[in-house]
Amino acid sequence: MTVPASAGRRRMDVMTSTEPSIFSRIVAREIPADVVFESDAVIAFRDIAPQAPVHLLVVPKTEQYRDVAELAAGDPALLAELVATASRLADELADGHFRLVFNTGAGAGQTVFHVHAHVLAGGLEEASLGGA
Ligand code: AMP
């Protein structure tokens, strides 16, 4: 069976990349970010292109997991910490109500393959479901 070379190359580029992700570079303070919370395992900062009055990214410091499905299978406790962090930050920075979005796969809009939760809060009537 013949697989189109371009599709294979794209997939391999993603799977074999040894470059740190942009979020790992934020963790390492190699690039600036508006960090609102940090623990041993998790960092949270404001999204550079906000889709809601409060738009945070909550990110495990490890880039071992590309997306939420991998994280759930590999380290459910870390996923639970991500959700608890999102909830606490929505309490502190908004009214406690929030939308949690994990874009999973390029076809769903994922552009950074280092798992992250979008936390949208504070005026959600203006935020679209797919806009995160
Ligand atoms: P996704 O499309 O779900 O992979 O989300 C990636 C998110 O990262 C987008 O909402 C971007 O706006 C955001 N983003 C990319 N670079 C930065 C950065 N340097 N600081 C903060 N947010 C960023």
Image: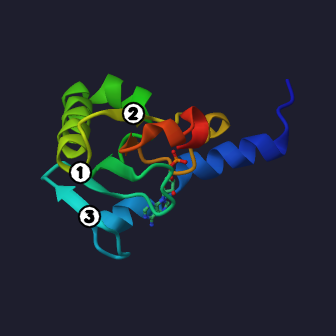
- Counting labels gives 3
Q: CA distance from mark 2 to mark 3?
A: 19 Å
Return the disc, 2 or 3, that comes first in the chain's sequence. 3
In the rendered structure, the answer to whether residue 86 lies left or right of residue 128 reads left
Residue drawn where x is 24% and y is 25% of the image: 76
Can you identify the residue that label 1 sits on? 93
Residue drawn where x is 13% and y is 52% of the image: 40
The crowd level at tag 3 (other Cα within 10 Å; few <14, some 14-19, many 20+) is some
Callout 2 amino acid: Arg
Q: Work out which quarter of the rendered image holds the N terminus and state it.
A: top right
Q: CA distance from mark 2 to mark 1?
A: 14 Å
The crowd level at tag 1 (other Cα within 10 Å; few <14, some 14-19, many 20+) is few
The dot on residue 99 is 2
Label 3 or label 1, whichever lies nearer to me, is 1
* Image vertical order of residue 114 relative to residue 124, above or below: below
Locate residue 80, reporting x and y percent: 21, 29
Judged from this view, the residue extending furthest toward the left is 40
Q: Is residue 59 visible?
A: yes
Q: CA distance from mark 3 to mark 1?
A: 13 Å
Callout 1 amino acid: Leu
Locate residue 32, reporting x and y percent: 35, 75
Return the disc, 2 or 1, that comes first in the chain's sequence. 1
Residue drawn where x is 33% and y is 25% of the image: 72
In the rendered structure, the answer to whether residue 115 lies left or right of residue 8 reads left
Callout 3 amino acid: Val
